[in-house]
Image (cartoon, rainbow, N blue to C red):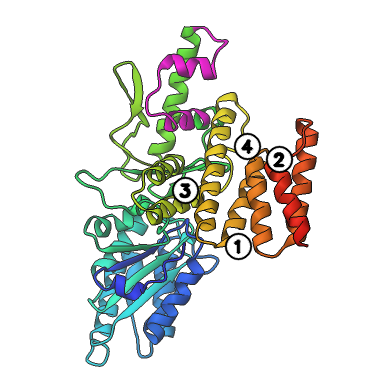
């Protein structure tokens, strides 16, 4: 859901603006910034061919010189001296420009778009940090990218100096959430859909085969798992010694995939062994869409008010974008997929009934029709859908819905609609 409250006001006490890479509303946010900042928004977009920090540095010098009347920078000469000196030189020129007497009383935002074109390695981190740390008080800086890594912004996140937009329907700011105590690598795990994993914002591009990837999701989807559970699921036909060897090789590959995405060069295991169970490692922070989905539904079930219930239901529905690990057909995945699909359909039905109680028939109808796609066997949902069409004066659609139900029931179980549904159908026909 797009948060319509003022970005400029929320950013007033922060230094850095980040667009969540998963947000569906990036263009809406940029439009809002144009409205709120007007001429004080300095927008620059990276183009094809800018692939590293040097290219970014040259682009910023050139584009700011074109965008800002009277701005001059010699920072391009510092690129050869390395990322820290180049970033500091540009920040110094920016500081001088925005703190002169005419501009010092105004507030500006520099927005860098399509930052994902640049490799976000250690040199990139050094360059961006030098710029952020040298900016004047009256200039905020924002970054928009389809992929955005954590390390360049860790200091700002930990200092509560970052505003993240686009996470309004998530329980927190995910990878850019402030951590208490030791700062740990952040896992961002998506299992609704084809499945993908990011570590500190970097995607795991290659798992070196399907097995490490599947074992990774098996671990993540369970808080506690025994070695016997793993062996019976993945290697039921191997003896214990053979299964143990394959397991350790596969588990080591998972560690490599995670660790390769962290810039500090350390090794990070997904799990630790404790009292006969593999449990989540305390060296990583997990952000798991399925876990968040289930938590949102639990929150809805115990909500103190209907408004809180609706908020939690909407958050859960927003998280479920596609079926669980949709490209795999292993028994444990199919079982889990069906359970989550049923939970999703129930959430849609609950949300439809929430709107129905408020006579919001159009909204209710939308949720009912989505629920029927997931659970076409639910006659009560067909009946409520018919009722919504009738309330909206769409008699033909209500009748067509009854005919679809009658055909479905006859084809699948060889019965006719129930007395209640048939009676509603009769009332609708009489009202035509």
The secondary element bearing badge 4 is classed as loop
Q: CA distance from mark 2 to mark 4?
A: 41 Å
**Is 226 contained in the magenta span?**
yes
Q: Which residues are magenta?
A: 214-239
Numbered disc in front, either 2 or 1:
2
Marks 3 and 1: in contact by CB < 8 Å?
A: no
Residue 419, numbered label:
2
Quadrant location, the C terminus:
bottom right
Q: Which residue is mark 1?
A: 362
Numbered disc in front, either 3 or 4:
3
Marks 4 and 1: in contact by CB < 8 Å?
A: no
Q: CA distance from mark 1 to mark 4?
A: 34 Å
Q: Earlier in the sequence, mark 3 or mark 4?
A: 3
Q: Earlier in the sequence, mark 2 or mark 1?
A: 1
> Residue placed at 66% from the left, 64% from the top?
392
Marks 1 and 2: in contact by CB < 8 Å?
A: no
Q: Earlier in the sequence, mark 2 or mark 4?
A: 4
Q: Position of residue 221 (x, y in %)?
A: 45, 32
Question: Is residue 270 toward the left or the right of residue 84 in the image?
Answer: right
301 vs 18: above or below: above
Numbered disc in front, either 1 or 3:
1
Q: CA distance from mark 1 to mark 3?
A: 21 Å
> Residue placed at 61% from the left, 47% from the top?
371
Q: Which residue is mark 3?
A: 316
The secondary element bearing badge 3 is classed as helix
Q: Which residue is mark 4?
A: 327
Q: Nearer the viewer, residue 123 or 165?
A: 165
Q: Earlier in the sequence, mark 1 or mark 4?
A: 4
Q: Residues within 10 Å of mark 1 (few under 14, many from 20)?
A: some
Q: CA distance from mark 2 to mark 3?
A: 34 Å
**Is 235 contained in the magenta span?**
yes
């Amino acid at each position: 859901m797009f948060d319509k409250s003022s970005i400029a006001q929320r950013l007033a006490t922060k230094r850095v603006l980040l667009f969540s890479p998963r947000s569906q509303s990036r263009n809406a946010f940029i439009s809002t910034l144009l409205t709120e900042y007007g001429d004080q928004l300095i927008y620059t977009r990276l183009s094809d061919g800018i692939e590293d920090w040097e290219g970014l540095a040259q682009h910023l010098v050139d584009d700011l010189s074109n965008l800002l009347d009277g701005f001059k920078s010699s920072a391009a000469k510092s690129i050869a001296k390395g990322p820290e000196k180049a970033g500091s030189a540009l920040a110094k020129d920016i500081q001088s420009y925005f703190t002169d007497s005419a501009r010092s009383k105004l507030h500006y935002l520099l927005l860098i778009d399509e930052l994902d074109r640049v490799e976000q390695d250690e040199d990139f981190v050094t360059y961006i940090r030098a710029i952020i740390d040298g900016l004047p008080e009256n200039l905020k800086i924002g970054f928009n990218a389809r992929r955005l890594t954590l390390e360049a912004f860790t200091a700002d996140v930990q200092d509560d100096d970052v505003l993240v937009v686009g996470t309004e329907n998530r329980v927190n700011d995910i990878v850019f959430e402030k951590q208490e105590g030791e700062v740990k690598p952040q896992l961002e795990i998506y299992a609704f859909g084809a499945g993908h994993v990011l570590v500190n914002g970097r995607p795991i591009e290659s798992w070196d085969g399907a097995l490490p990837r599947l074992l990774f999701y098996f671990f993540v989807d369970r808080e506690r798992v025994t070695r016997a559970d793993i062996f019976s699921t993945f290697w039921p036909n191997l003896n214990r010694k053979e299964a143990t060897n394959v397991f350790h090789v596969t588990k080591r590959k998972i560690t490599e995939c995670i660790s390769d995405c962290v810039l500090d060069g350390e090794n990070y295991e997904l799990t630790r062994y404790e009292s006969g169970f593999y449990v989540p490692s305390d060296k990583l922070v997990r952000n798991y869409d399925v876990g968040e989905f289930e938590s949102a539904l639990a929150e809805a079930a115990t909500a103190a008010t209907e408004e809180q219930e609706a908020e939690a239901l909407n958050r859960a529905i927003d998280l479920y974008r596609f079926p669980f690990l949709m490209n795999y057909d292993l028994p444990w995945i199919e079982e889990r997929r069906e359970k989550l699909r049923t939970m999703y359909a129930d959430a849609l039905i609950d949300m439809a009934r929430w709107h129905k109680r408020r006579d919001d028939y159009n909204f209710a109808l939308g949720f009912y029709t989505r629920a029927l796609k997931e659970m076409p066997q639910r006659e009560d949902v067909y009946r409520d859908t018919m009722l919504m069409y009738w309330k909206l004066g769409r008699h033909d659609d209500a009748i067509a819905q009854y005919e679809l139900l009658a055909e479905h029931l006859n084809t699948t179980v060889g019965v006719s609609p129930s007395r209640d549904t048939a009676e509603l159908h009769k009332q609708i026909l009489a009202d035509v």
